[in-house]
Image (cartoon, grey):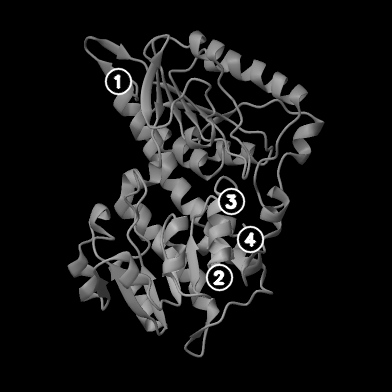
Amino acid sequence: MKLAVIRERREAEKRVAATPETVKKLKGLGFDVTVETDAGALASIPDSAFADAGATIAPDLKTAVADADLILSVQGLEAADAKLAKKGAAQLAVLNPFQELDRVKAYADAGLVAFAMEFVPRITRAQSMDVLSSQSNLAGYKAVLDATAEYGRAFPMMMTAAGTVPPAKVMVMGAGVAGLQAIATAKRLGAIVSATDVRPAAKEQVQSLGGKFVMVEDEETKAAETAGGYAKEMSDAYKAKQAALIAETLAKQDIAICTALIPGRKAPVLITEDMVKSMRPGSVIVDLAVESGGNCTLSKPGEVVEAYGVKIVGHKNVPSRLAADSSALYARNLVHFITPNVKEGALAFDFEDQIVAETVVTKDGAIVNARLKEAQ
């Protein structure tokens, strides 16, 4: 079995889909591992480290994927490169298929068996494969650090002979994996933290980390979470009530960390221009949803902008800003996904298994994922 790890080609992508640690594990499963040259360079992993782990270094993409049975990457082959892989080869990557359906169709046309790793179901036995959780965890941490870099004041309360410095007030919007890590990080830095989410189950999680939970609680919120653990789209009436509460709370905050995403949908607007106006000069907003439309109406992808004296941070691909750690976690996620699908020294995906069935997007020349079929 040949396995190829390719170099990422998209802007701001520094991660890599394997590490020397996982190369050894993949070889232990029976794979001959080929790594495209410089695949790990931006994640501080030189070719020599992969070679020392037993990988063969390929000079280019064509050579790397030639005859590969399995292709690992972070963001997937580009549509134009899909034909370089042999028909029937499997690919594991974060594919963003709802927004890049044409690329998924190119995979189907090339006969690839493509898996969108962000579709891994949130069930107990798939926790070690959950790339969204591993990457969001780091994004939530980094978001707070990005806020501290732009905020012109201290986070913790400081008592000095010259007077007392009050603690920063941080509001985290969206208490999923990224939001919970943001809460924990801000608390460790000494901030007073509050958080909001449409899912009532998030209340206990927020409070367990020392945060104050802010939410309109009514009948609609009882069904605000999908079976997969994601937030549902709420009604316009609920959004109006929640927006009023958030607006009142946000005006008293120094920093807002926005993490709210709805899979396959545009990110919900949580902070309007009027809300930005209400924040005091020097405040900071970090929008982790900026690439999906943004939780703040004034955020811009890839930019740090200032409006009404408030800095709005819209860095793209935040996990990639911690490339070494995010690559290590992502690579382990892939190994955990692959391991149960290697049987007697051969790659054999069980398409009846829930994890495989919900993650595969193309097979036998067609788009086979139910969620994607609905989107076409």
Tell me if residue 189 can be seen.
Answer: no
Q: CA distance from mark 1 to mark 3?
A: 52 Å
**Secondary structure of residue under mark 3:** helix
Identify the residue at image location x=40%, y=42%: 317
Sequence-wise first label, 2 or 4: 2
**Secondary structure of residue under mark 2:** loop
Sequence-wise first label, 1 or 3: 3
Residue of label 4: 123
| Residue closest to the far right | 219
What x and y, as percent, mark residue 100?
A: 54, 48
Instruction: Tell us which disc is closer to us: 3 or 4.
Output: 3
Q: Nearer the viewer, residue 226 or 266?
A: 266
Q: CA distance from mark 2 to mark 1?
A: 61 Å
Numbered mark located on residue 158 in the image: 1
What x and y, as percent, mark residue 235?
A: 76, 29
Numbered mark located on residue 111 in the image: 2
Sequence-wise first label, 2 or 1: 2
Q: Give the residue type at disc 1.
A: Met
Q: Are marks 2 and 3 in contact (CB under 8 Å)?
A: no
**Secondary structure of residue under mark 4:** loop
Residue of label 3: 101
Identify the residue at image location x=40%, y=79%: 67
Identify the residue at image location x=42%, y=83%: 1
What x and y, as percent, mark residue 94?
A: 49, 55
Q: Give the residue type at disc 4.
A: Ile
- On the image, which quarter does residue 150 sit in? top left
Q: Are marks 4 and 1 in contact (CB under 8 Å)?
A: no
What x and y, as percent, mark residue 158?
A: 30, 20
Identify the residue at image location x=66%, y=15%: 244
Q: Residues within 10 Å of mark 3 (few under 14, many from 20)?
A: some
